[in-house]
Image: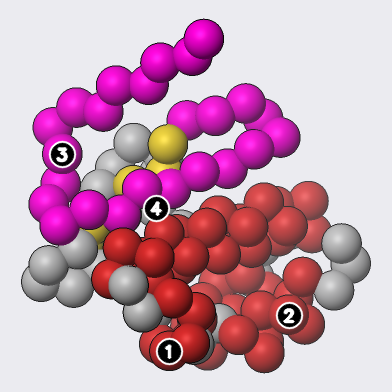
């Protein structure tokens, strides 16, 4: 996906694009998707969906397993998945533990 940086320029905040543009090319795509899933998780948790615009939601790259406060009510955490998948969970509070079950 060679146009990830261009898509980010259209939908992300300027400071997020700046961080993304400063990364080596091999890290840009994964960071782009990490940013996107965090924003999407937050927009779904608030019920606003993507109608408010992704640039209205500010996220940091953060580390997997760290809760990131997005505002006074919501936190988002990236959940560990396989190397080809990304997942984020947004909640009203920073959970102490998350259990993941597979069948």
Residue lying farthest top? 103
The residue shown at (29%, 43%) is 66
Where does the magenta region start and end? 80-103
Say which label, 1 or 2, has the lower sequence index: 2
Q: Which residue is mark 4?
A: 62
| Disc 3 to disc 4, C-alpha distance | 16 Å
Say which label, 2 or 4, has the lower sequence index: 2
Q: Secondary structure at mark 3?
A: loop
Q: Which label sits on residue 95?
A: 3
Provide the major secondary structure of the magenta segment: loop
Residue 45 lies in the magenta-colored region: no
Q: Which label sits on residue 52?
A: 1
| Disc 2 to disc 3, C-alpha distance | 32 Å
Residue 102 appears in the rendering: yes
Q: Secondary structure at mark 2?
A: helix
Q: How is the image coloured?
A: secondary structure
Q: Secondary structure at mark 1?
A: helix
Q: Is residue 32 left or right of residue 102?
A: right
Q: Which residue is mark 2?
A: 7
């Amino acid at each position: 996906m060679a146009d990830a940086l261009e898509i980010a320029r259209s939908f992300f905040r300027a400071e997020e694009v700046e961080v993304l543009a400063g990364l080596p090319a091999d890290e840009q795509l994964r960071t782009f998707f990490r940013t996107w899933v965090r924003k999407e998780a937050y927009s779904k948790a608030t019920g606003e969906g993507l109608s408010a615009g992704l640039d209205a939601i500010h996220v940091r790259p953060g580390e997997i397993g760290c809760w990131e406060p997005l505002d006074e009510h919501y936190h988002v955490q990236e959940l560990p998945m396989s190397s080809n998948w990304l997942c984020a969970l947004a909640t009203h509070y920073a959970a102490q533990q998350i259990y993941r079950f597979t069948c």
